[in-house]
Amino acid sequence: MRKIYLCVAAMYLGMVASYGQTKPVKDSSNYKSKELTFDEVNFVSAYYNQNGNNSAVTGGIGTEKLNDFANTFDVQLSKYGKNVRKNTFLFELGVDHYTSASSDKIDPYSISSASRQDTRVYPSLNWTNSDDNSGNAFGFTASYSHEFDYQSFGGGFNLTRVSKNKNTQFDFKLQAFLDTWKVILPVELRPPGYGSGSNRDDNRPVDYKPRNSFSTSFSLSQVLTTRMQVLLVVEPSYQHGLLATKYQRDYFTDGSERVENLPDNRYKLPIGLRLNYFLDDHFIVRAFYRYYMDNWGIRAHTAELEVPVKLTSFVSVSPFYRYSTQNGTRYFKPYGQHDPTDIYYTSDYDLSKLHSNFIGANIRLSPPGGVFGLPQLNSFELRYGHYIRSTGLNSNIVTLALKFK
């Protein structure tokens, strides 16, 4: 039941894998092993904390303090089929644990509600079939996620097409997530006999509502020169079902109080443009711009600049800065300012007018002999970012990523 305003970085953490003996490879440059082989293992750990004073749970005022410890682990295996096409299997397991002071205010009279802390588990499996010569590929993904107040089943399809000269690449992705949400209400707004939603100490019934999400992604990358590459991404999506968070309160000018209410459908259209420019052997400039719009009236602009600097052949440092500005939804008003005649209403500052700054740096080690003298440890990355928002929210995130090959 968390609301993390700055997404925890999706990098990867690693573990040392055990290697069994493999059969000797035939002495032929055209031979492709048909045995299932290990490619790599990634393991990521990230710690995120935030503070603010605009909690949507209490109507746009109150603590937003939250801590999240996120971990992901993935294993990639591959084998070649009879037609010499490569089959890649990627298994990922994510486990997040958080504590949220604002969620604890769903029932402020309890010592500590069941929603104050929770653990999210989300495994996924992807299969991709690719041609090493052409670069063309297609694949499918299945995923599952479970948390205190919801469960989700996901599926996806991905397609890649590469031009003959390898300078142009088109990628297409299609994803669907079928979610079921437990409708948890603030304690003072629960009908007689309605439960708290805690399976541990309350057997009274609660409602369950669906929320289905469908998204596509179209991206086109082009090598313009030996130094410059561009990428255009368009990612339309649609959501239908329970899109309001029913344990979030809204307060009105007549003194009344209700649970958040928002339309049951939402269309989103982000359009992004990325430019990579290789200045020389030591400097790369990575620039990114994204425009976002939806049918709730939100319009947003995001610009990011990252400059990786290669200090040595195996050590690089990448400072980055991101600025975002957003016009809020027509349904947002601060605490106590909603009109009683409004049909839709929210005091969630994620949906308000705002601007934000995100600044930090990443350091990466990838020596040819392995990091810290471990031959299997291919790379080590440490990333830190600090986020400041005009609404008063601020956060920090530290991410450690290890790759084993």
Image (spheres, rainbow, N blue to C red):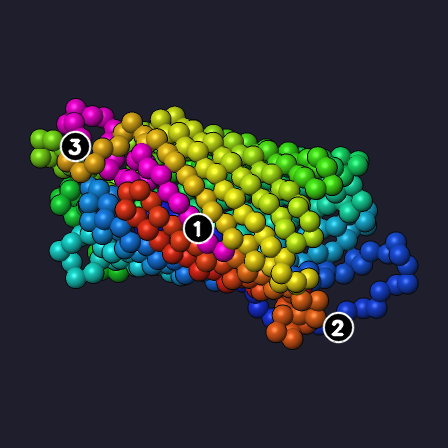
Mark before the other along the chain sequence, 2 or 3: 2
Q: Secondary structure at mark 1?
A: strand
Q: Are marks 2 and 1 in contact (CB under 8 Å)?
A: no
User: In the rendered structure, does residue 101 fall within the stretch colored magenta?
Assistant: no
In the image, 135 versus 361, the foreground residue is 361
**Residue 337, numbered label:** 3
Give the labeled residue for mark 1. Answer: 359
Give the labeled residue for mark 2. Answer: 21
Q: CA distance from mark 2 to mark 3?
A: 69 Å
The answer, for residue 352, to whether it is visible in the render is yes
In the image, 275 versus 155, the foreground residue is 275
Q: Amino acid at mark 3?
A: Gln
Q: Secondary structure at mark 3?
A: loop
Query: Which quadrant of the rendered structure holds the C terminus?
Result: bottom right
| Residue stretch rendered in magenta on the structure | 338-361
Q: Secondary structure at mark 2?
A: loop
Query: From the viewer's perspective, is residue 111 above or below residue 294?
Result: below
Q: CA distance from mark 1 to mark 3?
A: 34 Å
Q: Amino acid at mark 2?
A: Gln
Q: CA distance from mark 2 to mark 1?
A: 46 Å
- In front: label 1 or label 3: 1
The answer, for residue 207, to whether it is visible in the render is no
